[in-house]
Amino acid sequence: MRFCSKVILSILTLVTLEFLPSTVVAQVQEALTRDQVKDQDKWNLADFYPSDEAWEKDIEMLKSRIGDITKYEGKLAESATNLRNCLMLSDTLGMKADRLYAYAALKLDEDNRVGKYQELRDRAYAIYSQIGQATAYIEPEILKIPDTTLRSFLDKDPGLAIYRFYLEGILRRKNHIRNQEVEEVLALAGDATAGPERIFTAMDDADIKFPNIKDENGNEIELTRGRFGQILESPNRNLRRTASNAYNETYKKYTNAMAASLSSSVKVDFFYTKVRGYNSCLERGLDGDSIPVSVFHSLIKAASENLAPLHKYMALRKKALGVDTLFGFDLSVPLVPQSTMKFTYEQAQEYMLTGLKPLGEEYLANVKMALKSRWIDVYETQGKGSGGYTAGIYGVHPVMLLNFAGTLDDVYTLAHEMGHMMHSYYSNKNEPYIYARQSLFTAEVASTCNEAIMIKYLIEKAKDKNEKLYLLNYYIDQIIGTFYTQVWFSEFELKIHEIVESGGALSTDAFRKVYREVYQKYYGPDLYIPSDRDLGGLRISHFYRMYYVYQYATSYAASQMLSQKILAGDKKAVQAYMEFIKTGSSDYPVNILKKAGVDMTTTEPFQNTIRVFSDLVDQYEKLLLTK
């Protein structure tokens, strides 16, 4: 099962901020209770299980079947039949576990105060552990089968055909799998090597407390990460400055601990890289999806050599705000009066359906089906999970959680998550279970492609100058957050790993020096970084997932090219896109995107995104100066 969500890393707060309202609200109305929402606007989880009793029956049945998988242990090399039956049973167990977990987790997100579903979710999660233990022998045992024997199994048994790509992937990674004794030690080390991330999470989520500050009305409020993100959009510069100072002064108290934690995490990455026999952490990080290292380097190079549009926008922002010095806390406030665009959910659906027409009648028919079939939980209610996501569950249908409040952001969230929903719907329908999930390298393409189509539609339909400026600014900031920010994060990540790989050490000062250099390079001379504002690299949780963030930039670049071809009316491009969303992971991501018409082994997708950004900045400047 996969949960896909709209993630934009703020270049200011350097933490994930999802679906923030456009203004700081002094008083918040009490959320609705679930029974106050129409059934049509709530997802129907009876499609998963008609009742909790049915769920209980299924989990007991699954428990009784887990032991069946162990009868193949030590026998996979004996025959193709044994191997096929083992893999098929493993898939069956996984599908059932996904459905059990999804029902419990989704019911819990309806109201996180309900202890019953916390218990059901934890029980379902425990099932994954039991299945993992029971199936742990499978891949090591496959690796012991001689290559010639394994290939003969594939040639002789048609039932193994769907597993060919999976099995060949194991053979491809064979040189990086160690003997049984070493593998057992590595498995035992897993809990200990996960320590740095757990320590950082405990500090960031539990220990770090922000002080109270006064809002623009003189009221004392507690500063939180969410409120900080909202305040950074406030037109009151003194409030932004006060909040920024309080936020950063709080983190300064934890600088050494955060540096030690991140340094340890990078050393863990290097440890596994050496043990697995890779030349670099980057090579290991990209090998799982067989991504050429050159793709990562081309991304960094393309962005680094084309920073003029970003520097121009920083200068334009400084001029438009009328400030002598541009600080980090000046980068999120809108340059024009905030749009008063408000939408009902029905209007948001209409905007989306009209905007996405270029994707064709079949696509729209399935979007309409999703909208009317109670696959979406629309409104915020008391105790409901925050933000938004899509959960794709094999054998049922995807579902979407929203907290729709009528903002422009909410319209984009609906379109974004609908991209995930259709990707899951089509890939689940056309792929076997083992390949239904998408790689992260491709997972954000469909969602951001929808966003790109939608933003261009809304810009064309803008009613006045201010609305168009607001939408252009929205698009510009989206590219900064999803492309440029992820690229410079990736460059920072590369540099700190290279320091350890070359025998160097990562002190607090080393982190700050590298971070400051990369930050300043990307945002240019018009952004002033005070001496104590170079701590951001220490407080980004994504750096505890090695070479993770670059894939947001690659996905975004791919979606820009795909959306351009689709909007140009290229019917072959639409057909290729439909084939793309029917594909999960039955091929390597680079090959899947190449079939869709985007070659990620070239710099063209990255250069194209930079051209789009440059054109948007030029349009924005021209319109802003028009009287």
Image (spheres, grey):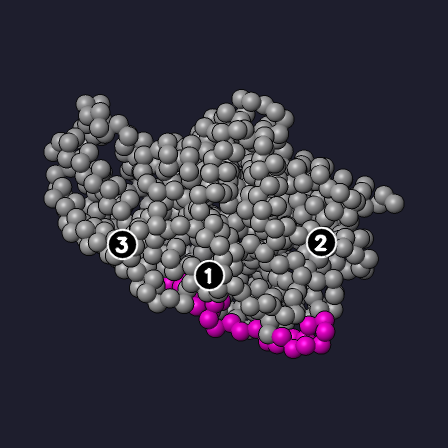
Q: Name the residue under label 1.
A: 34
Question: Is 218 left or right of 625, judged from the image as shown?
Answer: left
* Residue in the picture at 61% in, 61% down: 229
Name the image quarter holding the C terminus: top right
Residue 220 colored magenta? yes
Q: Quadrant of residue 147?
A: top left
* Residue in the picture at 46% in, 61% down: 34
Q: Name the residue under label 3.
A: 55
User: Which residue occupies the foreground of this view, 90 or 280?
Assistant: 90
For discs 1 and 3, the disc positioned in front in the rendered view: 1
Identify the mark nearer the N-term, 2 or 3.
3
Q: Residue 340 carries which label?
A: 2
* Residue in the picture at 74% in, 62% down: 235
Q: Tally the numbered discs.
A: 3
Q: Name the residue type under label 3.
A: Trp
Q: Name the residue type under label 2.
A: Thr
User: Which residue occupies the foreground of this view, 12 or 427?
Assistant: 427
Q: Distance between the residues labelled 1 and 3?
A: 22 Å
Q: Name the residue type under label 1.
A: Arg
Q: Give the range drawn in magenta.
A: 195-221
Looking at the image, do the residues carrying marks 2 and 3 touch, with CB atoms under 8 Å apart?
A: no
Q: In which quarter of the image is residue 124?
A: bottom left
SS at badge 2 = loop
Q: In which quarter of the image is residue 79?
A: top left
* Residue 597 percent across, percent down from the top left: 52, 26
* Residue 113 percent across, percent down from the top left: 41, 67
Identify the mark nearer the N-term, 1 or 3.
1
> Taking 357 as reference, is 341 above or below it?
below
Q: Which mark is residue 274?
A: none
Looking at the image, do the residues carrying marks 1 and 3 touch, with CB atoms under 8 Å apart?
A: no
Identify the mark nearer the N-term, 2 or 1.
1
